[in-house]
């Protein structure tokens, strides 16, 4: 039962992002709207494939087990520490989350994944979440991590989708209004796409080819992006740091889901485009970057699976 609840949570909030993006694109271009609708269709292929595989899952843990309690605590602490680094110490969300991810791998490696997941809630803007509201979201993401741990494994962005789920649930309960959306110029959109591809690709290479693991690889990319890009690009560097870090979640995908760099490049491209066209929605909510990455990876995997199925079927 827990696995179906976790599957439903991740699916629902991914579809919320997809539908929001489609609504925005419908007002911009019918051609782009149709193209994105096809992208959504491939993501649905992946979603239904994962749903069918839940029945055969044997690996699971009890919701009140010691392992589940440790995961809950790690996610909560990761969220709180990131918020402190980002808001109270003023180093910003990208550096805050990147530092927590890397420190978790070094000092508490078995719990690095839930801690990194919690850090994405800690990236929320204080304008959206004051401390008490943020604590509610931190508890929510800890519960959601336990519920979702066994589903959609290997798809980059899953952790961020858990974080966005908690942020949106808490924001909905208190009736919070999201922050205003940025407006991107042509040069900004071009750079966003380029750095999205780079963020995804570098993370994947570090994680898979250099065997550093997904959390360390993503945390390192976030640290470099957050520290250097605002310096080299004074006007848009902050946005590019966020984009590069967000796209790194695409690169966190497991090799059995995304076995080639070409797929990661395509996933990074999709990340950049979805980031641009979903901008009007959920501003300031931690985890949105991860949900964009998750949506991108689901779409790329669905496309790959569809093509492989057709080739195999007709060969």
Image (cartoon, rainbow, N blue to C red):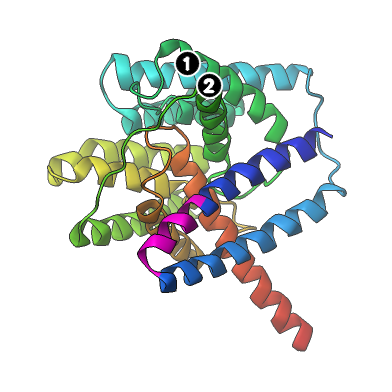
Q: Which residue is mark 1?
A: 133
Q: Residue visible at 25% across and 62% down?
A: 190
Residue 260 visible from this viewpoint: no
Which residue sits furthest bottom? 315
Magenta residues: mostly which secondary structure?
helix
Q: Which residue is mark 2?
A: 137
**Residue 242 vs residue 189, the one in the foreground:** 189
Which residue sits furthest top? 132
CB atoms of marks 1 and 2 within 8 Å: yes
**Residue 191: x percent and y percent?**
24, 58
Q: Residues within 10 Å of mark 2 (few under 14, many from 20)?
A: many
Residue 144 in which image quadrant: top right
Q: SS of the residue at dot 1?
A: helix
**Residue 167: x percent and y percent?**
51, 28
**Residue 214: x percent and y percent?**
51, 43
Q: SS of the residue at dot 2?
A: helix
**Residue 218 vs residue 9, the one in the foreground:** 9
Q: Residue visible at 59% across and 42% down?
A: 13
**Residue 168: x percent and y percent?**
52, 31
Residue 270 in which image quadrant: bottom left
Q: Is-magenta flag for residue 26? A: yes
Q: Residues within 10 Å of mark 1 (few under 14, many from 20)?
A: some
Q: Which residues are magenta?
A: 20-29
């Amino acid at each position: 039962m827990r696995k179906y609840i976790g599957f439903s949570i991740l699916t629902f909030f991914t579809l919320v992002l997809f539908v929001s993006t489609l609504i925005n694109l419908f007002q911009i271009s019918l051609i782009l709207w149709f193209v994105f609708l096809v992208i959504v269709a491939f993501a649905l292929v992946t979603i239904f494939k994962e749903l069918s595989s839940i029945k055969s899952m044997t690996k699971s843990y009890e919701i009140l087990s010691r392992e589940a309690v440790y995961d809950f605590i790690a996610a909560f602490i990761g969220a709180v520490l990131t918020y402190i680094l980002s808001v109270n110490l003023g180093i910003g969300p990208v550096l805050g989350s990147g530092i927590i991810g890397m420190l978790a791998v070094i000092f508490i490696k078995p719990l690095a994944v839930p801690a990194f997941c919690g850090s994405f809630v800690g990236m929320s803007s204080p304008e959206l979440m004051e401390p008490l509201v943020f604590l509610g979201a931190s508890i929510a993401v800890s519960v959601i991590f336990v519920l979702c741990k066994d589903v959609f494994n290997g798809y980059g962005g899953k952790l961020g989708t858990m974080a966005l789920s908690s942020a949106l649930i808490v924001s909905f309960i208190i009736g919070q209004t999201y922050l205003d959306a940025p407006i991107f110029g042509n040069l900004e959109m071009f750079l966003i796409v380029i750095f999205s591809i780079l963020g995804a690709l570098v993370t994947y290479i570090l994680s898979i080819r250099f065997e550093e693991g997904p959390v360390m690889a993503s945390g390192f990319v976030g640290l470099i992006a957050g520290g250097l890009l605002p310096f080299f690009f004074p006007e848009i560097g902050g946005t590019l740091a966020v984009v590069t870090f967000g796209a790194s979640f695409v690169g966190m995908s497991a090799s059995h889901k995304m076995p080639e760099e070409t797929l990661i490049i395509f996933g990074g491209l999709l990340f950049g485009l979805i980031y641009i066209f979903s901008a009007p929605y959920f501003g300031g909510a931690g985890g949105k970057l991860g949900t964009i990455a998750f949506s991108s990876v689901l779409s790329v995997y669905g496309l790959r699976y569809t093509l492989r199925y057709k080739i195999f079927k007709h060969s």
